[in-house]
Each structure stands twice: as structure tokens, then as C-alpha cells.
Amino acid sequence: MVEAIWTTTEKDGRTVVHLIDQRELPTREIEVPCRTHKEMAEAIRAMVVRGAPAIGISAAFGIALGAQEDSAPSEGLSFSTYMEQVALTIGQTRPTAVNLFWAIERMRPIWQKNASLPPRDRSRILFDEAQAIKDDDILRNKKIGAHGQSLLPQKATVLTHCNAGALATGGYGTALGVIRGAVEAGKTINVFADETRPYLQGARLTAYELAADGIPTTLITDSMAAMVMSQGRVDAVIVGADRIAANGDTANKVGTYGLSVLAREHGIPFYIAAPFSTIDPKTPNGKAIPIEERSAREITHAGERRMAPDGISVYNPAFDVTPARNITAIITERGVYRPEELSEYLSSHSGRESVPQA
Ligand code: MRU
């Protein structure tokens, strides 16, 4: 299965974090090596790596790279102050996916606890923690796949949006994890992949991943989703999430909200598949989720070619919010919850778990 993030060790013992350049897929498989936390921050910002869990894992590796660089002495800073600056640089890359901040919170006590160790030892411990976050994410996704597949009939067509697959996670995927889980359970699954304007994660990444797995996939433009639903050709919509608020409102790739309205109109179940690291109990509802706005060029251009008149004003929110009332269920590694059940679960567990475990 395609891998988004991996590490190698150089002759001098230093770790390099490699990313597959998702901007180039599916036509070119190029890797981007990251040796510094600033290189990793730039890779997240520029969407070399994207997808909420993959952003979180990359952030954790970015923290470890920062510790490995250890520019604290040359900058005249204590290790802890320097690491806070590293975390700030990484935390300022993309605002919506809460996994980014979740990963920083998980790494902070580790760098604080090991601050007095020799530099090599403390960076090794941080790399091990980042790798554990990645490995743990794959296990969570397999559980999401197992729980979610039970919701699908023996033969089903699933519509998905954006890319919530191996490329967007440590591996296996969330929404695509459910599809993979169903295929592994012997079900016959066909997929409609929305192309996902403007950045085309569906056309470039989901179609690439599913084709590699041999899962029958039909690519449609986003505006065709209504048509195929009205034709009775969709049994379920399954998408990932960038942040799930305490009341179940969910931010995901722009266009997801519209799909939820369409699914409701056509009586089609609408599922969010996401690990607990995407749930943000501190954000009460969708209105409080920060929505990233991206460059106008993503809309005015197709590749290098300008498609819109010079000077046209453009609005390009990268995400929208699906209200909890439109969500049939949220599929997590701990089981399947209706949004109101998830809210109850969160309020009954509040304060007991700063770092959710699978
Ligand atoms: O802008 P992106 O490509 O990072 O947006 C990704 C999505 O919206 C995904 O659906 C979401 O992060 C879930 S990935 C398992």
C-alpha cells in the first residue's frame, strides 16, 4: 500500500523524514526529504503531505526533527523554549485539522520530561514517539474499517469525497479504510470518487489509491453527485474529517456539507469515518472551527493555465462544516456513534483523557 511518510537513517545516525509529494501524484512519484522542522512545516503548508491524520503524524516528526537540529544553544535558548518555538512554527501551518494540534500536545510532555538528556537520546525518544503515533494510527484505521464495514450491505456502492485514504493517514485510511475493510470482509464494493474541486484530491489521490488496490472506482465531478444519487446508484456516503466538534458538527473538505444535504434528500446514510485524534472536545460546535482559506490560484487556474479573468474576486475556503443533524453516524476506532451519542460519550469522559488511546 502507498505510504505517505517514512524515515531513514543517515550514516551519521541522523534521521531523515521522507514524504511522498502528493502535489505530483498520480503522474509522478517523487519523495521530499525533510531534515529540519522548518522543511517539515513548509511541506505541511504547501500540501506535500495533507489529510488530517497524516498532518498530525508529520507534525510529530517535525517536532522530533526540531529536537535533532537542537539549535537551542546557538540561539541562546533553553531546550524547552526552543522546542516551544519549533511547535509554534509547525502549529502555524494549517489551522483546521485538529490532529496537528493533538500531535503537538502529545509530543510536548515527552520533550519536557526528557529535556535534561543528551541531545541524541532526547531526539531518539521523540522520533520513537512520532513513529508510535504513525503505527497507532494504522491500527486505529483498521479498527475503523472493521466497525464501518459492518454498516454496508454485501453489495454496495459508496460515494466518497476528497482523499481519506492511506495517503491522508499513517496507512489504510479512514473512509477508504471502511471500503478496504468491506472488501476484506468479502463484500462487493464499487466506489464513486468525487474529483473534489479545486485541489482534486479525489481525482488525483483517491482514484490512484483505489485503482492500485483494484477496487472498482468511477470518477465523477462534484456536481454529478446529485445525479448519481437521484438515479439510486449510491448506497452510502463515507467521508473523513478534519475536526469533529463536541456536538458532532464536522469540518471536512469543502463540498462535504453539500453532499450531506443531498444524502438527506435521497435517504442515503451519511457517515464520517475518523479516529478520536480528530475529535476536538474543546471546540463546542462547527461555528467555532477555524476554516482555512487557500489561494485564489487554485480556482482561477487549471495547472498552469488561467481559466478565469484577471482580477476576478475569489473565495476559496478549503473546508466546510456538516451539521451533526445531517450525519447518520461517526465511525471511530472505538465503535460507531450517532453524533448525539458521541457528544454524550465526550461529556462523560471529559478531563479523563488528554491523550486518547485506541
Ligand atoms: O486539504 P486536505 O487535502 O488536507 O483535506 C483533507 C480532507 O479534507 C480529508 O477528508 C480529511 O483530512 C480526512 S483524511 C483521513
Image: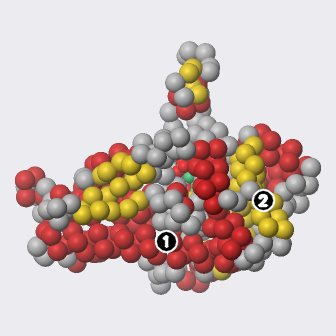
Q: Which mark is residue 190?
A: 2
Question: Residue 5 lies in what quarter of the image?
Answer: bottom left
Q: Quote the CA–CA distance across marks 2 and 1.
A: 25 Å
Left or right for 244, reference 337: left
Tell me the quarter of the picture where residue 182 sits.
Answer: bottom right
Judging depth in this view, the residue of 312 and 179 nearest the camera is 179
Q: Is mark 1 within 8 Å of ligand 1?
A: no
Q: Identify the residue position indicated by label 1 in the image.
A: 137
Q: Compare residues 222 and 19 and report the one nearer the observer.
A: 19
**Where residue 35 appears, x then y in whole percent?**
25, 53
What color scheme is it?
Answer: secondary structure
Residue 96, percent from left and from top: 51, 53
- Please tell me which residue lies in front, 329 or 346: 329
Give, as a three-letter code, the residue at label 1.
Answer: Asp
Q: Is residue 125 visible?
A: yes
Q: Which image quadrant for residue 336? A: bottom right
Query: Which mark is first along the chain, 1 or 2?
Result: 1
Q: Quadrant of ligand 1?
A: bottom right
Residue pictured at 41% horizontal, 63% vertical = 57
Badge nearest the viewer, 2 or 1: 2
